[in-house]
Image (spheres, rainbow, N blue to C red):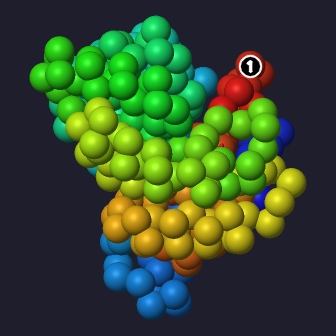
């Protein structure tokens, strides 16, 4: 658990201050690991939090945010984007094909491409809308039956299919390690896979393990609780 977390939900939460100290910690971890300064971007995961909680982070100059549900993002972000047009919005949760159209319109990055049917429908929507969000393949590094993602052994084949059959460009890989596992071997596996496939993007690491992810090659860490405090009751992560 990060020291920034406020698991009880009690007491004041200062998202902008939390984010600033997280960024500083990441820079220290990068230095220790011999990685270039600034090589990890923080995706501030704002799911379940309303605009009041998000605004201080925007006012502090941060622009990269993650949401895990299309409907929630559509309800929250158009108004914020009007005020801050350079926001980068990343979809980090599972995407149903019947929401692909809205997702292509609303998101700048879709991290959860996890099956051929979705890839095909995204390709069609991108063509139709002439809008090309950056895409990541979600990898099920723990091969958990209930979790979305391509099995590690099948990522190469799926990448080729995305490129050759659907004409999609893929930026990188994303994973959510099993909650009960040591995340390090999962991050190392994802990094190795991305390297072998020549993919530059690596989205891995959350509130409890972002420093480990930064050391192991993440280019994006997805941090919610350690920035914004605990989420209000209805939790979405188990569905991811
Ligand atoms: C909610 C969520 C996160 C952020 O989790 P925290 O532990 O609150 O930092 C990261 N990635 C995904 C896919 C999520 O759904």
Taking the image as shown, residue 179 lies to the left or right of residue 212, namely right
- The answer to whether any part of residue 155 appears in the image is yes
Taking the image as shown, residue 116 lies to the left or right of residue 142, namely left
Mark 1 = which residue?
Answer: 234
Q: Secondary structure at mark 1?
A: loop
Taking the spot 77% from the left edge, 59% from the top edge, the residue there is: 1
Q: Nearer the viewer, residue 47 or 147?
A: 147
Taking the spot 33% from the left edge, 13% from the top edge, the residue there is: 101
Q: Is residue 223 above or below residue 27?
A: above
Q: Nearer the viewer, residue 162 or 190?
A: 162
Q: Is residue 217 above or below residue 159?
A: below
Figure quadrant of the C terminus: top right
Taking the image as shown, residue 228 lies to the left or right of residue 80, namely right
Q: Is residue 87 above or below residue 160?
A: above
Q: Position of residue 195 (x, y in %)?
A: 43, 72
Rendering quarter of residue 34: bottom left
């Amino acid at each position: 658990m990060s020291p920034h977390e406020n698991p009880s939900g009690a007491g004041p939460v200062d998202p902008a201050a939390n984010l600033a100290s997280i960024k500083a910690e990441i820079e220290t971890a990068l230095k220790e690991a011999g990685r270039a300064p600034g090589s990890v971007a923080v995706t501030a995961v704002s799911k379940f939090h309303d605009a009041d909680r998000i605004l201080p982070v925007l006012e502090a100059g941060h622009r990269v945010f993650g949401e895990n549900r299309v409907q929630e993002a559509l309800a929250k972000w158009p108004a914020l984007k009007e005020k801050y047009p350079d926001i980068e919005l990343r979809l980090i949760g599972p995407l149903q094909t019947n929401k692909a159209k809205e997702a292509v319109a609303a998101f700048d990055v879709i991290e959860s491409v996890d099956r051929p049917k979705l890839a095909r429908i995204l390709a069609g929507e991108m063509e139709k809308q002439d809008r090309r969000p950056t895409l990541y393949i979600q990898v099920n590094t723990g091969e958990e039956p209930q979790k979305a993602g391509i099995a590690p052994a099948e990522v190469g084949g799926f990448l080729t299919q995305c490129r050759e059959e659907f004409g999609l460009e893929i930026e990188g890989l994303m994973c959510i390690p099993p909650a009960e596992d040591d995340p390090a071997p999962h991050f190392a596996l994802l990094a190795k896979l991305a390297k072998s496939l020549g993919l530059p993007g690596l989205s891995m690491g959350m509130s409890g393990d972002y420093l480990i992810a930064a050391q192991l090659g993440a280019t994006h860490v997805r941090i919610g609780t350690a920035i914004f405090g605990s989420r209000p009751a209805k939790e979405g992560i188990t569905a991811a």
